[in-house]
Image: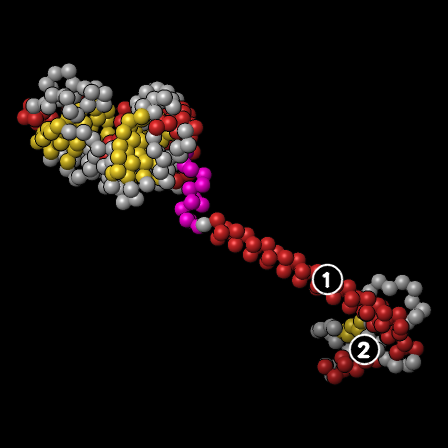
């Protein structure tokens, strides 16, 4: 089940504020809709928040080629010249980049978005994503859309850029629509036509007059903007950066709790085997050291202190060999014999000390 909520454009929405909502099945087919306080809103596995166009500002910016984290830090300052608010008070999210290298950026007041999400959370509703209501209109190349309502009016360009405006007081098209068309002409991207959706109960504007003033073909029709309409592919999810759901990364893996429990059990068992193996090797090491010391003490019972049995064994063995008249490998005679065999050249000087033999043959020494 998918629940889509249209957040009212009020400054501080509360639990008693009516929210328009639409409930759909897993395939997106609408089941029912209504407008009630949050207590009367049905529950669903997936919740989507739709923000009013009057609360979201769009801008096209040429951004530097840096990583996503740096872009998130720079965006509030990049749109600072288009806003009156402090950059620290806004939340900006980048969207797609067009062929001219301009990135579409959606901006919303940080405090308002925080309060809105807090109100929903207190009612047990945690949106998986939040988009502007302009995303409810189809994205068609060369075609713009406008919505004229009693409490909301906005224009959506074919790349997803949207702007809210006041309801026109006369038959003339809104100034915001004419300015957007002129700017598009400068970018060589003027639309071919403009579709105007007029909410029931309001007068349908003169399409010919609008077309003449705006410079595009205008088609006006009466109807309601469906909250259950498919979202445009250019829709920007405002639940990004600081507002991203912390469990989104884990939830995207779609692993059941049993799988996580199994992974934890495997890690614990592996750690247990590692500790057991270390304990076994340490016990063998101590056993071998004790056996080596026992053999040394059996061979040399007069030894009082045993620090390194192997080294002490070699030294005592060498001393016994010398006491019995047997030469060791470091005695003078074995060293001199080996030196003579390796190099028969006459020696000029021979030095022997500390088991080391040095021979000076004139051009080389050893």
Instruction: Point out the residue furthest to the top here.
Output: 169
**Rendered residue at 90%/76% (across/down):** 320
Q: Which residue is mark 2?
A: 329
333 vs 236: above or below: below
Residue nearest the observer in this picture, 124 or 324: 124
Q: Position of residue 257 (x, y in %)?
A: 48, 49
**Foreground disc of the pair 2, 1:** 1
Q: Is residue 273 magenta?
A: no
**Rendered residue at 63%/60% (across/down):** 273
The N terminus is located in which quarter? top left
Prevalent SS, magenta region: loop
Q: CA distance from mark 2 to mark 1?
A: 35 Å
Q: Position of residue 240 (x, y in %)?
A: 38, 36
Circle 1 SS class = helix
Residue nearest the observer in this picture, 265 or 331: 265
Query: Contact (CB < 8 A) between labels 2 and 1?
Result: no
Q: Which residue is mark 1?
A: 282
Q: 84 left or right of 273?
A: left
Q: For the residue carrying disc 1, how many other residues have a C-alpha within 10 Å: few (<14), some (14-19), or many (20+)?
A: few
Q: Position of residue 338 (x, y in %)?
A: 76, 81
Q: Decide which of tag 2 and tag 1 comes sooner along the chain.
A: 1
Q: 32 left or right of 247?
A: left
Circle 2 SS class = loop
Q: 248 left or right of 318?
A: left
- The stretch in magenta equals 243-255
Q: Position of residue 357 (x, y in %)?
A: 80, 73
67 vs 49: above or below: below
Rendered image coloring scheme: secondary structure
Say if residue 124 shows up in the picture. yes
């Amino acid at each position: 089940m998918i629940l889509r909520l249209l957040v009212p454009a009020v400054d501080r929405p509360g639990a008693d504020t009516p929210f328009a909502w639409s409930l759909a099945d897993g395939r997106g087919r609408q089941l029912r809709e209504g407008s009630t306080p949050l207590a009367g809103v049905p529950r669903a596995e997936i919740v989507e928040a739709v923000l009013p166009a009057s609360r979201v500002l769009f801008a096209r910016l040429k951004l530097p080629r840096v990583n996503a984290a740096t872009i998130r830090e720079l965006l509030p300052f990049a749109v600072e010249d288009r806003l009156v608010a402090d950059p620290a008070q806004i939340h900006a999210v980048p969207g797609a980049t067009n062929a001219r290298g301009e990135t579409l950026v959606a901006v919303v007041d940080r405090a308002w978005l925080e309060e809105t999400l807090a109100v929903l959370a207190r009612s047990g509703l945690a949106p998986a994503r939040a988009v502007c209501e302009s995303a409810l209109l189809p994205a068609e190349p060369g075609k713009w859309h406008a919505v004229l309502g009693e409490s909301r009016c906005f224009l959506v360009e074919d790349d997803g850029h949207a702007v809210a405006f006041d309801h026109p007081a006369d038959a003339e098209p809104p100034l915001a629509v004419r300015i957007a068309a002129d700017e598009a002409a400068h970018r060589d991207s003027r639309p071919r036509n403009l579709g105007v959706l007029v909410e029931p109960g309001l007068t349908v504007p003169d399409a010919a007059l609008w077309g003449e003033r705006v410079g595009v073909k205008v088609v006006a029709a009466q109807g309601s903007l469906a909250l259950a309409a498919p979202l445009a592919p250019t829709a920007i999810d405002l639940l990004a950066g600081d507002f991203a759901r912390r469990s989104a990364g884990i939830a995207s893996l779609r692993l059941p709790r049993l799988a996580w429990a199994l992974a934890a059990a495997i890690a614990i068992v592996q750690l247990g085997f590692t500790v057991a193996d270390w304990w076994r090797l340490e016990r063998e090491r101590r056993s071998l050291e004790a056996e080596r010391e026992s053999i040394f003490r059996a061979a040399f019972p007069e030894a009082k202190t045993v620090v390194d049995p192997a080294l002490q064994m070699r030294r005592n063995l060498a001393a016994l060999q010398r006491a019995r008249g047997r030469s060791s490998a470091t005695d003078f005679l074995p060293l001199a014999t080996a030196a003579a065999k390796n190099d028969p050249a006459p020696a000029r000087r021979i030095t022997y000390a500390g088991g080391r033999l040095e021979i000076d043959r004139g051009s080389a020494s050893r």
